[in-house]
Amino acid sequence: MSSLEFTGIGVHLKVKDIQKSRAFYESLGFTPAFGYGSEEFRKTLPEGCGSAPEKYQGVTYRLVDGAELEIADGHIAAKPTVFAEEITSGKISAMIRVKSVVPVIEQCKDRIKFPVRKYYWNSIEVALRDPDGFVLVFIAPFSDEELERVSKLVSVETVNP
């Protein structure tokens, strides 16, 4: 069995009001590195900030040494009602950057309840819940080799813009 080689970690906060949350984090000095959502929302991002269309709005802030904080008002792995809740373990998910998602799939295949996806921003992602329901999203860089290895274990959805 392969072992994980960690390359970074992040936190994804499910927020009730994306604009209010953005204002708070950006007032603290967080600078958007990437944003997604409607065209109108993406126009509010700073010049030079990468972006992509999506059904919901979100912003990623890159911190140091591979750490990221992401806020969003929607997510594939959360029911819409969670965004109105007070902070609980269901409101936060950890994004964990790894060299390969294969060990995650091999070790946690029974916990994977969300589609394994290859995204157009060049990643392959596996989302699962820990024993307490906390969502962990393991993210590996896309390569043809990784896609082939993952596809031998599970079906992979491809998400395009």
Image: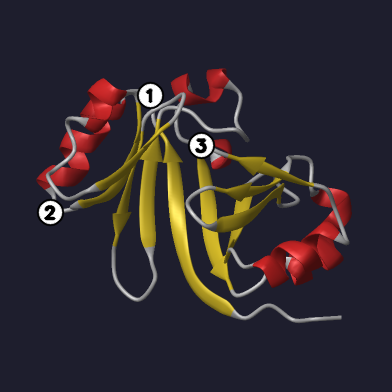
Nearer the observer, 110 or 144: 144
Q: Residue 87's spot in the image, x, y percent?
A: 45, 35
The crowding category of the residue bearing disc 2, from other C-alpha atoms within 10 Å (few below 14, some 14 to 19, many at least 20), is: few
In the rendered structure, are the residues bearing label 3 and label 2 in contact, judged by CB atoms less than 8 Å apart? Answer: no
Give the residue pinned by disc 1: 16
Mark 3 or 2, nearer chain start? 2
User: Tag 2: residue type?
Assistant: Gly
Give the residue pinned by disc 3: 91
What element does badge 1 sit on?
A: loop
Q: Residue at x 18, y 38 (%)?
A: 45
Q: Residue at x 22, y 28 (%)?
A: 20
Mark 1 or 3, nearer chain start? 1
The crowding category of the residue bearing disc 1, from other C-alpha atoms within 10 Å (few below 14, some 14 to 19, many at least 20), is: many
Nearer the observer, 36 or 114: 36
Q: Residue 104's spot in the image, x, y percent?
A: 75, 65
Q: Residue at x 45, y 46 (%)?
A: 12
User: Tag 3: residue type?
Assistant: Lys
Specify the label residue 29 is tagged with.
2
